[in-house]
């Protein structure tokens, strides 16, 4: 047998390295994906402007875009464009969409551990907010949710902020960005830090205090994404966090 013949050693097959965009490829594609999300969101508002027969100008877009229903639809329409852009980036690498984004279901223990950590983190920020005499929820979000509830857009806003937004943001931050940057010179710690920073920048409508809270939550999500190797885990945690915030804000606002 060849395997026992020193002149013919057994053939050792080296597995091919995973096809992953590294630092700059991930960064450039990340910009493209963010742009795609923006196009989907703005496109939804522009479509509403056209359907209402309003002038197709910036004033009309700003006017319609401030309505709760339009804002909810904008957030929702950002999801398919984001996923499409990510799919294109992964498709070019000829990699598995599921494997690249770690679309694996977490265990109950992982979900419980992630939820407990998130609850403790949110409670810490809540306690700090009360000690500083600050609002636990940004004022403009409270006004938006109250207005949406009064105008019959409560469930649309609930879906937008508790389903569409978490899925879009997680696919970008803990999905695509984390995957590529963790395979680069940044490694896992750097990928968690930088993807959390990018995720924080997406929320620039908040002040510096709430941005700090978003950043720390992003660090926890990044750690859980690495620990469980599951994007579904961080998506569920993100959705539960937003769902709780939206429901409590609407209830308190009443």
Image: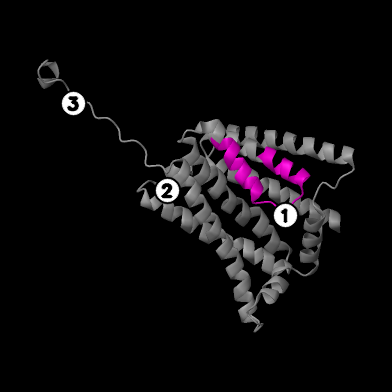
| Total numbered circles | 3
Which residue lies at the image location 66% right of the left edge and 46% below the top edge?
A: 200
Residue at label 3? 11
- Of 13 and 194, the residue lying toward us: 194
Residue designated by label 2: 97
Asked whether residue 150 is drawn in magenta, I would say no
* Magenta portion: prevailing SS class: helix
Image-quadrant location for residue 2: top left
Quote the CA–CA distance across marks 1 and 3.
58 Å
Distance of label 3 from label 2 (alpha carbons): 31 Å
Residue 105: x %, y % from top left: 51, 41
Q: Residues within 10 Å of mark 3 (few under 14, many from 20)?
A: few
Badge 1 is on which residue? 205
Label 1 element class: loop
Image position of 54 with respect to 248: above or below = below
Q: Are marks 1 and 3 in contact (CB under 8 Å)?
A: no
Residue 183 rendering spot, x and y as whole percentages? 45, 35
Q: Along the polypeptide, which appears first: circle 2 or circle 1?
A: 2
Q: Position of residue 68 (x, y in %)?
A: 73, 66
Residue 129 appears left or right of 222: right
Identify the image quadrant of residue 21: top left
Q: Position of residue 169 (x, y in %)?
A: 59, 50
Name the residue at 64% across, 51% down. Answer: 202
Quadrant containing the N terminus in the rendered view: top left
Q: Is residue 217 above or below residue 31?
A: above
Residue 189 visible in the picture: yes
Instruction: Give the residues in magenta.
Output: 191-217
Neighbours of disc 2 within 10 Å: few (<14), some (14-19), many (20+): some
206 falls in the magenta region = yes
Badge number at residue 246: none
Residue 225 versus residue 166 in the image, above or below: above
């Amino acid at each position: 047998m060849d395997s026992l013949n020193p002149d013919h050693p057994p053939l050792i097959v080296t597995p091919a390295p995973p096809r992953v965009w590294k630092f700059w490829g991930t960064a450039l594609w990340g910009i493209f994906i963010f742009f795609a999300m923006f196009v989907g969101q703005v496109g939804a508002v522009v479509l509403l402007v056209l359907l209402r027969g309003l002038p197709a100008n910036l004033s009309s877009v700003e006017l319609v875009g401030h309505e709760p229903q339009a804002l909810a639809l904008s957030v929702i329409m950002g999801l398919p464009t984001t996923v499409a852009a990510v799919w294109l980036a992964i498709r070019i690498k000829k990699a598995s969409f599921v494997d690249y984004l770690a679309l694996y279901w977490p265990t109950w223990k992982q979900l419980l551990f992630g939820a407990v950590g998130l609850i403790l983190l949110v409670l810490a920020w809540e306690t700090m907010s009360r000690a500083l005499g600050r609002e636990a929820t940004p004022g403009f979000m409270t006004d938006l949710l109250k207005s949406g509830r009064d105008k019959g857009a409560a469930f649309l806003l609930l879906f937008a902020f508790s389903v569409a937004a978490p899925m879009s943001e997680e696919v970008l931050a803990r999905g695509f960005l984390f995957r590529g940057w963790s395979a680069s010179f940044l490694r896992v710690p750097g990928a968690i830090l930088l993807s959390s920073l990018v995720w924080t920048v997406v929320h620039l409508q908040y002040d510096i205090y709430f941005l700090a809270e978003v950043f720390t939550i992003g660090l926890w999500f990044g750690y859980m994404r690495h620990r469980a190797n599951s994007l579904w885990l961080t998506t569920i945690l993100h959705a539960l966090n937003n769902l709780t915030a939206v429901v409590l804000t609407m209830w308190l606002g009443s």
